[in-house]
């Protein structure tokens, strides 16, 4: 089988490093370009010693020049860049015939005004929003397969959307009562020097942040509104916890009058019976980040609180995996007609 020549733009951060790991091991991919202004000229093995000796680890970083990337023969590119930066190079690579999977927030939102509200600047490429596909494979597999520009979801949104979408589509819960509490490992903040992220600041510490309007709230509410067929506004409270990676989310909502709690489990089973990377833990199942880190799985359990009438949804994923790099690779497999689990087995 001829391998698909592929590039990673912005390969020196935590998500970029995870993409390097996944792509070097993928049987259907040849990694032909990895970009980083800071690391240009150095090999993957030098920058990331864990990859030394792996086939492909001798590849040298280059600068993020679209012509240089296209000259490698790459057919696709993963963009692991900050929001506001990704859009420009996405356009340039699309013009050169590459398919693009963007892991920033630049193409996740349909409305450029919502983007400006949550990200503090005008959208850099509003004309591309209409064709970008929100890359949640369990929800939009057919659209992803036909796309040339995929907006890979954020880590928090993935952990919230997958448990909620089936229940909203089935009309089981009152959207106005949704509250999502998430806890994320420190790698979710990116690979940067920042005092609040230093070991002594994060260790033995748990704190909320980004309230009441975390940026990911914009795409969460967008996708929940589409599922419900009406505008949905929720409360979302993210927390930073002293682990390297992993997200645990507990979402609560009131069941609608007359709804039997058993319908929750039935809706989840119906939605994800054939989903390769959704593991349903059933009623009473409490998801644990320990069982999902370094995988593309999301574990989902649920319970019903008869005293309050609330349904409790518990999910866990790896913020660098199912919340970022490996989910983007899941979309890549759809784009190129590869086996759904190719390169995504437990490693």
Image (cartoon, grey):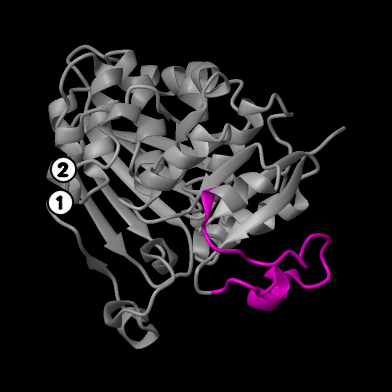
Q: Is residue 292 visible?
A: no
Determine the main secondary structure of the stretch shown in magenta: loop
The residue range painted magenta reads: 39-66
Quick one: 178 or 77, which is closer to the camera?
A: 77
Image-based side of 316 in relation to 208, left or right = right
For disc 1, the marked residue is 120
Indicate the secondary structure of the residue bearing disc 2: helix
- Name the disc covering residue 116, or none: 2
Residue 250: percent from left, percent from top: 32, 46
Whole-number angstrom distance, CA of label 2 to CA of label 1: 5 Å
Looking at the image, do the residues carrying marks 2 and 1 touch, with CB atoms under 8 Å apart? yes
Residue 232 seen: yes
| Left/right of residue 230 with respect to residue 159 in the rendered view | left
Q: Residue at x 82, y 64 (%)?
A: 54
Of the pair 327 and 286, the residue shown nearer to us: 327
Where does the image place residue 17, in percent across and percent down from the top left? 58, 62
Using the image, determine if residue 322 lies above or below residue 291.
Answer: above
- Which of the 4 image quadrants contains residue 331? top right
In the image, is residue 203 above or below residue 1? below
Image height check: is 193 above or below 217? below
| Picture quarter with the N terminus | top right
Left-right relation of 192 to 18: left
């Amino acid at each position: 089988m001829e391998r698909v020549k592929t590039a990673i733009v912005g390969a020196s951060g935590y998500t970029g490093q995870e993409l390097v790991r996944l792509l070097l091991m993928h049987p259907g991919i040849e990694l032909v370009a990895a970009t980083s202004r800071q690391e240009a000229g150095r090999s993957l093995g030098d920058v990331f010693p864990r990859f030394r000796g792996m086939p492909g680890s001798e590849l040298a970083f280059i600068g993020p020049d679209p012509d240089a990337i296209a000259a490698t023969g790459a057919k696709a590119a993963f963009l692991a860049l900050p929001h506001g930066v990704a859009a420009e190079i996405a356009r340039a690579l699309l013009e050169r015939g590459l398919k693009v999977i963007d892991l920033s927030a630049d193409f996740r939102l349909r409305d450029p005004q919502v983007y400006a509200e949550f990200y503090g600047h005008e959208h850099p490429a509003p004309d591309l929003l209409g064709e970008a596909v929100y890359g949640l494979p369990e929800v939009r597999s057919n659209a992803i397969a036909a796309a040339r520009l995929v907006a890979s979801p954020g880590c928090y949104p993935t952990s919230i959307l997958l448990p909620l979408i089936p229940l909203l589509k089935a009309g089981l819960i009152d959207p106005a009562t949704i509250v999502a509490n998430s806890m994320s490992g420190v790698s979710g903040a990116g690979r940067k020097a920042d005092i609040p992220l230093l070991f002594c600041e994060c260790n033995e510490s748990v704190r909320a942040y980004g309230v009441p309007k975390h940026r990911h709230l914009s795409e969460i509410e967008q996708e929940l509104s589409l599922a419900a067929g009406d505008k949905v506004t929720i409360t979302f409270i993210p927390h930073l916890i002293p682990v390297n990676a992993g997200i645990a989310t507990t979402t609560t909502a009131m069941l609608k009058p007359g709804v039997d709690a058993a319908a929750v489990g039935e809706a989840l089973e119906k939605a994800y019976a054939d989903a390769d990377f959704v593991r349903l833990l059933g009623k009473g199942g409490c998801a644990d980040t320990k069982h999902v880190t370094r995988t593309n799985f999301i574990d989902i359990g649920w319970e019903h609180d008869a005293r309050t009438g609330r349904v409790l949804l518990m999910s866990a994923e790896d913020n660098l995996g199912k919340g970022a790099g490996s989910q983007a690779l899941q979309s890549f497999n759809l784009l190129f007609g590869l086996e759904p689990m190719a390169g995504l087995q437990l490693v």
